Amino acid sequence: MQKGFQRQKSAMPIYTTLSIPTVTSYPSLKCLQWSADCQVCFITKSAVVILTPDHGINFDNDSVIKSTPNTDDPVLGWFKTMIQHDQITPMKWPDYSQTWGAASLGSIDLSLTSVAISPTGLSSNGGRCIFATLSSNMDVNLWAAGKNYLKGEWLKIFEVTPYLLNAIAPEQEEKCTAAAVLQAQIISIEWTPQVDFGIEPTPWIDCSLLVLGSRAGHLTFLRYRNGAAHRVASLSVSDQWITHIAFSAWNYGKPGIYEGYLAYGTADGSVGLVKIAQTLQVNEETFSFTPKYDIDVKLEHGEDLIYGPETLAGITALRWIRVPGRTPILVTSNPGLIKLWSAPETAETTYWTGYRSLRIQTQKISTDSSAFHPVSGITYLHKQDKLVMTLFDGSFHVIRHFSTDPAWASRAIFDSDRGRLTSEALSNVSRSTFEMAEKGNVDRTDMSRIYGAMSYDNAACFLWAYESARPSDFSYKHDAKHSSMLVVAQMWESEDDDLLQELEILLNNVKTSSRLSPLHTLRPFLLHLRNPARLDVLHSKLLEILQSKLQTDHSTKVHTHPWEGDLDLETRLKFRIGLTTNLFGWDDLLSLRMKLSLADFAWKLSSTEEHRSECGVVAQSLLNSISHRVLRTIIRYLFSVVISLTANEIPFVSRMIVQSLLPGCPPDLTEEGNRLSALIQPLVDANAPADSVATTGIFSKLNEICPACGVEVPLQDITTAVCENGHTWPRCSVTTFILSTPWVRTCVGCSRKAFLPPSAQKDLPAIARGWVVEELLEAVHKCLFCDNGFVSIL
């Protein structure tokens, strides 16, 4: 054992070996997932463990947990929280039906079986992801983070199962039928991504669907809005249990219509298809500051099955793999077998279509290794055109030429990567990492049971969760003795040039419609750039990428419809939605924010003062560009409601005007500020004290009162306020008012602070209680400067 342990000192870096003392759930593709907020979701028996890597986060970094077997490796830190699923009240199915087919044996020992994660931006209390959990009792619940999504409590926000039963059977007598109960008993879940309709700014509308597969063979499609799930459609596709669901991706079908395919697997091993079409339609019936859209959903069930029940084996994994330049490939696994399917094309293609089957080859890395273990991870490597699969026995299996001529990548076959990406090579690295994590206290009888595995950086770094076990001795282990290990390790060498090339492509093509947080999108690059030595080598090339200038200012394209009626709650809501759309819906602005995040990241980790100074210059230039675009957007929205402005809005509007007059502002933005100043001057004059000097105008509304000593504080800096007695106060990054209240939120990326929105039921300072400020604070659910999420303490 010690010999094997010593051998691993030359192995690839291991960034994390984090022990999680809990009983793991089931080996599956759902056991370990990334959320769009860059959080790892790890399913255990009684809870969802939520872990967030610390790179790129500048909030409470002293509280992260770290662990790695080799002190020479750059360790990753993690923020940890969890969803306490064992505290839910399970559905009492016998109250509705006592037929044998509706019996829930999973209620005897309740556990988590699956999780589906929404795109980011859906939760009402911070615009983050929503987690849908599925239990062994066939209960579905929705959860969202509270004040602090990194470490704080996650709250149950909606019980889907009771709602679904009521939607299926509105009358009490109908609820007690076996048909209604079976349709409400959910055993598989999936959440689709958002649709990119090619509209800019991206409409702030949810196009994602939560899909539920039931015991009755029904697929139910839900959409989350206004704090609850709503049924969009339901479709009967089988008379068998739907055990697996996998969604491909949204693709352009016809003008204004985007289509995607949902594959479903049933208990008898059959696999079928449902085509989902979503149409975006402009709603011109009512006034809106920006175009308002409705979404129409149509479902089409394919008559022919992809695979029939003749397989005589259950499905262990189902996933679509999207390969650029060709139709998506559906991967289905049965014990010992991998099946591939791609929709046949009518015209000739350069890639394969139809069916392929590959029998899994056993990798004897432990005594109990077998090709018949379930698949627990599937990752597609686009650059190498290889599919990497992980089995429950801890082995890795690689399919080469996946999109053109799939076959197993083994040592017996010539490989352009010089043997680095073969099944044997990756399995050996996995086993070596296992021995290192266990500090060499293993032998051939110890199995590394991998419950879930996925890529960390879309390249050579993988993340998996395992538990050490000895299946051959049939010993019983009490729940309290179970402990899982979360591992992040590099599997082969990667190139720096490839890293920056991919970063440049990402920054030039990033889409707001993806609803992915910058921390998630930049995760592969932050992982590798956090090494100061590597960052110094790449410093010049990185700054060159970050300084690439945009040709146009998107904010000049922001157009709003002027409001001429009375101000009511509905109009304020439309104003808020319009602000959100234009502040967070432009691809160019998202690219700028991501560049600023990278510049700040490089500034923080630079090893020399010269490099730090160069990063600071680039960051300041990006900050100015972002500030000017945000300011122009707000000013144009103020133009649209100028007749609805009241005296309470004067302090905020004055600030926007003064900022547009500062040195460095584009001349056309300064002109817009002057026009707005002229429009609100009558309002300022009407509310000016009788003894005030008329020439002071809007400048008389800029001063605030120091919360400590009560003297006036002039607006000399939009980030910090200092009174004549030396008291220093931070300013709100959204409104520029002094943060004179403890009810604030902090950006996890850049640490900028802002007032909590009124929906948090916390009072704002008197100077900030205008309706425009209130709606702006509600609209800004993410940081205006780096696009990352907020957290709050109080």
Image: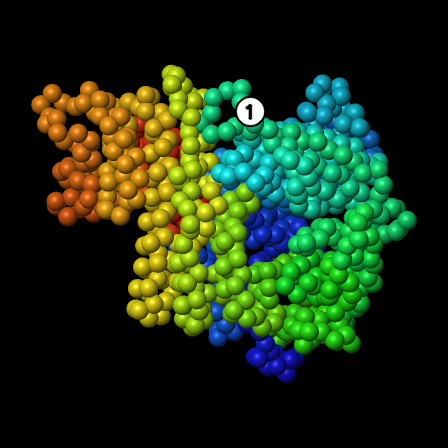
Vertical order, 700 against 529 (above or below) = above
Residue 712 placement, left or right of 44: left
Q: Nearer the viewer, residue 117 or 104?
A: 117
- Looking at the image, which residue sits at the far right? 310
Q: Quadrant of the N terminus?
A: bottom right
Q: Is 660 located above or below residue 563 in the figure?
A: below
Kind of residue at badge 1? Asn
Q: In percent of the image, x 61 and y 72: which residue is there?
A: 492
Most foreground residue, 555 or 367: 555
In terms of depth relative to the viewer, which is nearer, 372 or 622? 622
Instruction: Give the x, y percent position of residue 349.
Output: 77, 54
Which residue occupies 14% across, 31% down? 696
Total numbered circles: 1
Does the image show residue 160?
no
User: Which scheme is used to colour this image of the protein?
Assistant: rainbow
Percent position (x, y) of residue 444?
72, 74
For mark 1, what is the residue?
A: 283
The outermost residue toward the top is 566
Identify the residue at image location x=54%, y=38%: 199
Q: Position of residue 297 (x, y in %)?
A: 67, 31
Classify mark 1: helix, strand or loop. Answer: strand
- Image quadrant holding the C terminus, namely top left
For residue 258, what is the image quadrant? Answer: top right
Residue 378 in the figure: left or right of residue 293: right
Residue 45 appears in the picture as rendered: yes
Q: Give me the residue at 66% from left, 73% from top.
A: 417
